[in-house]
Amino acid sequence: MFEEKIVDFKPSSGSIPLVGASIVVDQSDYPGVIRAARDLAQDFACVTKGYASPLVVISSDSDYDKIQTETAIVVGSVASSGIIKTLAQQGKLDAQAIDGKWETFSTNIIDQPLGKCEKALVIAGSDKRGAIFGIYTLSEQIGVSPWYWWADVPPKHHEEIYATEKQTVHGEPSVRHRGIFLNDEAPALTGWVREKFGGYNSKFYVKVFELLLRLKANFLWPAMWPGYPNPGASFFTDDPLNQKLADEYGIVISTSHHEPMQRLSNEWFAENPDGSWNWLTNKQKITEFFEHGASRAKGCDSYFTLGIRGEYDKKMLAEDPAAVVQDAIETQRQVIKKVYGREDAVPQLFAIYKEVQSMFETGRLSVPEDVTLLFQDDNFGTIRRLPTKEEAKRKGGAGVYYHLQYVGDPRSYKWINTNSL
């Protein structure tokens, strides 16, 4: 919505036509970038009411002959695309403005970019999501809403689309990780998901992943309510492709404020009875449970939640809850070190939720410097506190867990209008 304009629907000086232009991507690029390029090809068909744009996947120099159009849209990441690297080495593309940046992309019109193609709009991303966000920015600007599928938003018809001559750089986001928590999902969402997809499987989640990326989000706490049917939704085990495809798409997977170490509560209660989630009496088995989650997440873009709460997201029943939480954090850090080699090898967060905030503010908890402090609202949209000046300097930074709806005491409000952002 707020990005600099890179397209128009009438020609201007230096602009190039995009309708019918080949969309070119390198085979060596991230699978998520190639997949988004396919979306872009189809998006042009939706806007023009014609055929999808020809997609050309380049695996060798001889493949340049497959580009049969005078103009092209070249998309790729500086990190992995051989095409983007070659254009930079030839001096046709200045990648210095984006190289090494987080989720940044540039757009340029380049003469004689490759093969017999005369001109190309080049969308170059600093990394995987930078390239993907560049692709989806073009999709949105030609008229495809991020909500086209979820809200049945039809694109406005255009027969002509042009890339403007102006070079642009779309810089780093001010918030590195931005996403949603699919919570309180039954009965409405769960009933619909079971009817349309058969459960919380990859067929459902890829729709969520795509929406997040089109909205320039990158982070997800997946659905996790118990029951319907028991033991309830478990992202990591309901479908083995869920975690794999999240990483392929470019979505960082984490787990909710009370589900540590890439494990969901329903995974535990599928094998263990009520009353067994007790750190004081079952520490060894819970630690092994955490280690499995850490090992399973290897190779996937993840953000580990630390800490521990009582069974089913309730207040912990212990004489000294803060001591239990502190011991859990220290044990979890050792598990991460065992699996990944260092305690800080993967991004981690600590959710300062409800009674945990008083433990934190009274100095009863010591949270490692590299761990993100996730502050929260009061469950009704009012922020309880912001980080202090010293907390803001922490290597792990800070975040916020904000409610658009809530189920719990003193009152639920999922059945009425939600909070505003």
Image: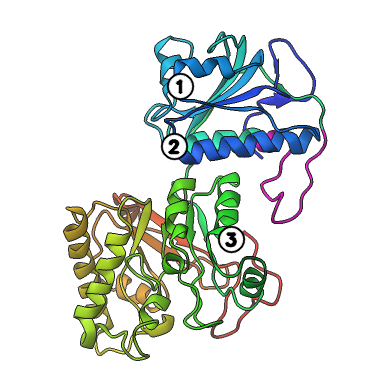
Q: Which residue is mark 3?
A: 204
> Badge 2: how crowded within 10 Å, few (<14), some, or many (20+)?
many
Q: Nearer the viewer, mark 2 or mark 1?
A: 2
The span from disc 2 to disc 3 (Cα, nearest Å) is 22 Å
Residue 175 appears in view? no
Of residue 147 and residue 416, the one placed in the foreground of this image is: 147
Cβ atoms at labels 2 and 3 below 8 Å apart? no
Q: Which residue is mark 1?
A: 84
Of residue 53 and residue 218, the one placed in the foreground of this image is: 53
Residue 161 appears in view? yes
* Vertical arrangement, residue 14 with respect to residue 48, above or below: above
The residue that appears at 37% across and 73% down in the rendered structure is 357
Residue 362 falls in image quadrant: bottom left
Residue range corresponding to the magenta coloring: 139-157
Q: Position of residue 111 (x, y in %)?
A: 58, 9
The span from disc 2 to disc 1 (Cα, nearest Å) is 13 Å
Q: Position of residue 302 (x, y in %)?
A: 37, 55
